[in-house]
Image (cartoon, grey):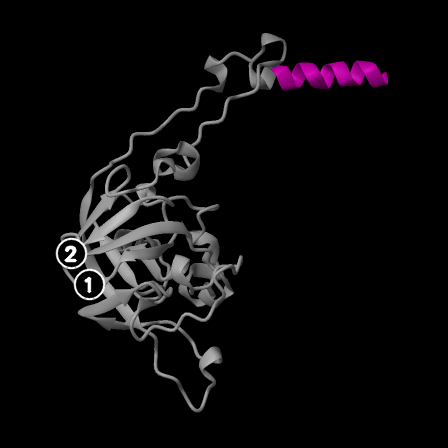
């Protein structure tokens, strides 16, 4: 194959977009009826107008999962904050999904950012630079989210199934107080954002090269020719 046939198509990325902190859900729900802390639900979280965040997340949140849990889970310094888009939530609601803000375990809802560009390696500055987050991974949805979606289809926010709709986990690089209505600035090549934040494979917009046509024919004609050749080979 030629170099041109293996060239990736890289979609345009908005590198320095600005948005707003639409909502903060910092505190886990209160423990009920003598439930053990490790068994208590961690969402839907309680909404706040402002909250302090540090290396292990928001004060008052409960993050029980191991840092290396491969099924998702909220916990540890690499998954200290769960971040999502208020614009994505509104789009899902418009499609009939019964979810509500804060119901999927997110700590922060941002609005006005191009969510397809909020990828691992990107950094998000909140409130004029006092708080700095780095996106570390996409948050995998789980069965606990079934009630939030039509027909229990929680995969509607899976990065593998619906790119640009996933929640993301963040590490807290600079802690501080986050306030509702504060500026949210996306960095993909500034403020120390990782170079791979611009990689199309990370962005999920990788245009893979097509295989060469069979005998120079269009796909439908190539399939017909291959089927005819197989029939002749088998004596049918």
User: Residue 36 magenta-drawn?
Assistant: no
Q: Residue furthest right?
A: 235
Q: Which residues are magenta?
A: 222-236
The residue that appears at 48% across and 67% down in the rendered structure is: 65
For residue 153, side relative to residue 134 (left or right): right
Task: Locate residue 59: give its quadrant.
Answer: bottom left
Q: In the figure, 62 relative to 215: above or below?
A: below
**Callout 2: helix, strand or loop?**
loop
Q: Are marks 1 and 2 in contact (CB under 8 Å)?
A: yes
Residue 6: give its label.
none
Q: CA distance from mark 1 to mark 2?
A: 7 Å
Residue 127: give its label.
2
For residue 76, side relative to residue 12 (left or right): right
**Location of residue 236 in the rendering, given as x and y in whole percent from the top left corner:** 83, 18
The residue that appears at 25% across and 71% down in the rendered structure is: 47
Q: Residue furthest top?
A: 216
Residue 178: give its label.
1
**Location of residue 11 in the rendering, given as x and y in whole percent from the top left corner:** 34, 29
Task: Locate residue 24: give its quadrant.
Answer: bottom left
């Amino acid at each position: 194959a030629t170099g041109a046939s293996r060239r990736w198509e890289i979609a345009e990325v908005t590198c320095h977009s600005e948005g707003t902190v639409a909502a903060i859900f910092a505190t886990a729900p209160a423990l009920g009826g003598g439930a053990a802390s490790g068994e208590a639900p961690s969402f839907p979280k309680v909404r706040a107008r402002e909250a302090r965040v540090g290396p292990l997340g928001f004060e008052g949140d409960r993050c029980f999962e191991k840092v290396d849990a491969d099924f998702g889970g909220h916990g540890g310094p690499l998954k200290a904050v769960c971040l999502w888009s208020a614009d994505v939530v509104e789009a899902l609601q418009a499609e009939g999904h019964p979810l509500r803000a804060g119901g999927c375990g997110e700590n922060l809802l941002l609005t006005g950012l191009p969510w397809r560009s909020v990828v691992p390696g990107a950094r998000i500055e909140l409130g004029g630079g006092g708080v700095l987050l780095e996106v570390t991974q996409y948050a995998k949805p789980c069965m606990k989210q079934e009630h939030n979606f039509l027909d229990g289809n929680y995969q509607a926010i899976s990065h593998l199934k619906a790119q640009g709709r996933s929640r993301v986990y963040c590490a807290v690089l600079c802690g501080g107080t986050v306030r509702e209505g504060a500026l949210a600035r996306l960095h993909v090549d500034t403020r120390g954002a990782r170079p791979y934040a611009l990689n199309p494979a990370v962005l999920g917009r990788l245009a893979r090269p097509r295989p060469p046509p069979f005998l120079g024919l269009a796909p439908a004609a190539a399939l017909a020719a291959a089927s005819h050749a197989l029939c002749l080979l088998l004596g049918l």
